[in-house]
Amino acid sequence: MTAHKDVTMRLDAASDERGGPRIDREAVNTLVVFGLSIVLILCSRFISPALGSWDQVLTVLTLASFLVVVSFGQGLVILIGGLDLSIPALITLGGVLTTTWIGTGDQGIWYLIPLILVICAGVGAVSGIGIIWLKIPPFIMTMATSIVVASVALGYTSGTPRGGSPTALLWMMKAWFLGVPVVIYLTLAFILFGWALQSFTAMGRRLYALGTNREAARIAGVAVNRLELAPYAISAACAGFVGMMLVGYSNGATLRMGDSYMLPSIAAVVIGGSSILGGSGTFLGTVGGAILLTTLGTVIAAIGLSEGWRTVIEGGIIVVALLVLRGELLAHFGGRLRRR
Amino acid sequence: MTALPGTEVSVAGLRRRSPLLRAVVSGTGIVALLYIILYALYAFWQPSALSVFTFTDLVNNSTPLALAAAGETLVVISRGFDLSVAGVVSLTNVLMAVYPLQGPGGALVSLLMCCAIGALVGGINGVLVSRLGLQTIAATLGTMIICQGLSLVILDAPGGTIADFVTYSLTDTLFGVIPIAGLFLVAAVILWLALRRTDFGIGLFAVGADEQSAEFSGVSVRRVRFGAFVGAGMLYGVAGFMLSAQTATGNPTAGTPFLMLAFAAVALGGTPLSGGRGSLVGSILGAGTLMLLQKVLFSGGVSSFYTGIFQGFVLVLAIVFGSAIVRLLGKDAG
């Protein structure tokens, strides 16, 4: 038993020494991902003259905004070594509550939007409680919350959500300002906020500490249990907000509106250079991953490949990205033994 | 030295009590009891539940999930998670719907094809995990996504038909009493009981309990992990085969519900998700209990919209109680 512990500690120490060069590699990874997106957009001109234009760039960025927001939450959860599988259900919850409670009249929108986000965050916190205090593996706990929430949404709407989009959300998703959609400005603000929160605040640094070595973080005085709750709540609130964005974008809610964001949210984080074991990665990398995936999606659609091939390619990219980051995985082998 | 006699007595006492205690308190015992109680409740609300027809129907409904959960158990015992179950079930179901092979021979070929696909996906998982050092969740997430994509490529919307022989004979009964689908479960149980005693079976538990100790004691961790994934994949393949017999049609997302339900069945069957312990028999009973629960809720007047709520709670409760029992047993033993 002691021998096993010694090995674990030694390996952790080894991975801690890599703190310096790792930052550089993350920056390189982020640049590579952004570069690939630009190259892909430029190359897509050869496929169809309609692609590769400024308008197409704006379309890609608008479509990517949904993924950027959910991936922020997913990224925080992955940062602490978890996995959030409840994102689709919470997108649906956010969307359904928005159309049924607020609807087209914008009545009480100023307190209902925050209320819905708080409800979503509360659901995420319930996942967190199950993971932290009941010691249920993260992906199973979020899967359980997910099926409960989906079932509630199904029962509440009796299968078909009523109501339409509030005009404020329609404006947010459809309006243009100075030749650029409003949502792109908002996404940019969100990216800056998320990047600052994850990389430059005390809370963000504590999350890295928690993801790298939970025990060490606890000894260093981090309130690990309370801190671990935050990513799940934030992720759920982000998903709820994406539900609202989708309501504004397509003027209504459906029960399956969140389904197509589950896998891309994980893929964006992994492609962005975060270790699936937690403790590394930046939000800027994830943003790059989200934009690359969205670009790839539009190009695949333009070529005429089906949804199935798109999924296959996404899965392939995840596996390849994981293998590329394998060196880092081996360095975290101690973490794997501890947390699986 | 003075303390020894007392210790001996208590150890001997424990040993005498242990097999009985373990049989009753073990996950398999509890889930079997739960199944009987639920069945009694079902029969109370729905007196026809005691007929051969209803029982056959129940076994037919439970078999795909039971086989998938049995496969998942192999990976969970070896201290891993396998998400590819959803992908393999969808993929095999879609293939059977798009390429139906008629007659008994065709059914056999289809079964072998399903097994082969499962083994292939399991083998890829095994290589990714044991050779390339990927985390089990990450590797199987990747293969699950790829399999789901391939299912969509093969069949982009629900449709197609399964061969008649498969749909009729595999949902029928033998001598009018024994559900044929149940024979697949019996075969899985017999294979498991035999496998458990082999080097591979012992290695499976050893790797799950403590990977390093197992390696030091001469167990090939790589080979055991690889074997667990391949075995699991083959069982998922058979699960997809039985699901096709059940639904008689193809659906590219047929496997999606299996992901959560398989883990729920494993946890309900008393296999702790931390690995090193557990039983395939418990998982099969766990799967049966989950399907029975749906029937009981339905006959109890709960709208089918809300079954998900109960499934989610059962999953969480099963894991919490399961780990509590493991802790209790651990205290008794040590």
Image (spheres, coloured by chain):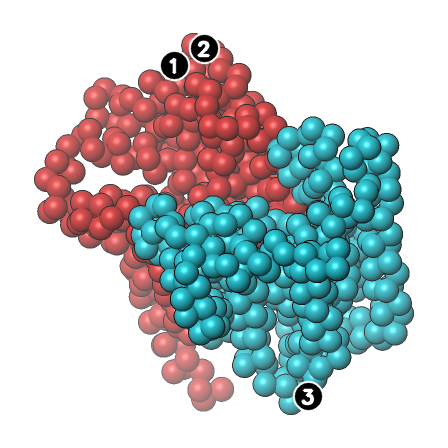
Chain colours: A cyan, B red
Q: Does residue B66 appear left or right of residue A322 in this picture?
A: left
The secondary element bearing badge 2 is classed as: loop
Q: Is residue B84 left or right of residue B169?
A: right
* Residue sitting at x 24%, y 48%: B303
Q: Nearer the viewer, residue B7 or B191?
A: B191
Number of marks present in the image shown: 3
Can residue A305 be spotted in the picture? yes
List x then y, in percent, for residue B312: 38, 57
Q: Amino acid at mark 2?
A: Gln
Please state the chain letter of the residue tagged with numbered disc 2 in the rendered image. Answer: B
The tag on residue B102 is: 2
Disc 1: CA contacts within 10 A as few (<14), some (14-19) or many (>=20): some
Label 2 vs 1, first from the N-terminus: 2
- Which corner quadrant of the image does residue B229 belong to? top right
At label 3, the amino acid type is Ala
Q: In the rendered structure, are the residues bearing label 2 and label 1 in contact, judged by CB atoms less than 8 Å apart?
A: yes
Is label 1 in a helix, a strand or a loop? helix
x and y, in percent, of residue A141 in the image: 47, 62
Q: Nearer the viewer, residue B17 or B169?
A: B169
**Chain containing the residue with disc 1:** B
- Category of crowding for the residue at label 3, using alpha-carbon neighbours closer than 10 angstroms: few (below 14), some (14–19), many (at least 20): few
x and y percent of residue A206 in the render?
68, 80
Decide: is A19 above or below A316. Answer: below
Choose between A245 and B69: the one closer to the eye.
A245
User: Label 3 lies in what chain?
Assistant: A
- Rounded to the nearest angstrom, the CA distance separating label 2 from label 3 is 67 Å
- Residue B17 image-quadrant placement: bottom left
Real-space Cα distance between discs 1 and 3?
Answer: 65 Å
Instruction: Return the residue at label 1.
Output: B164
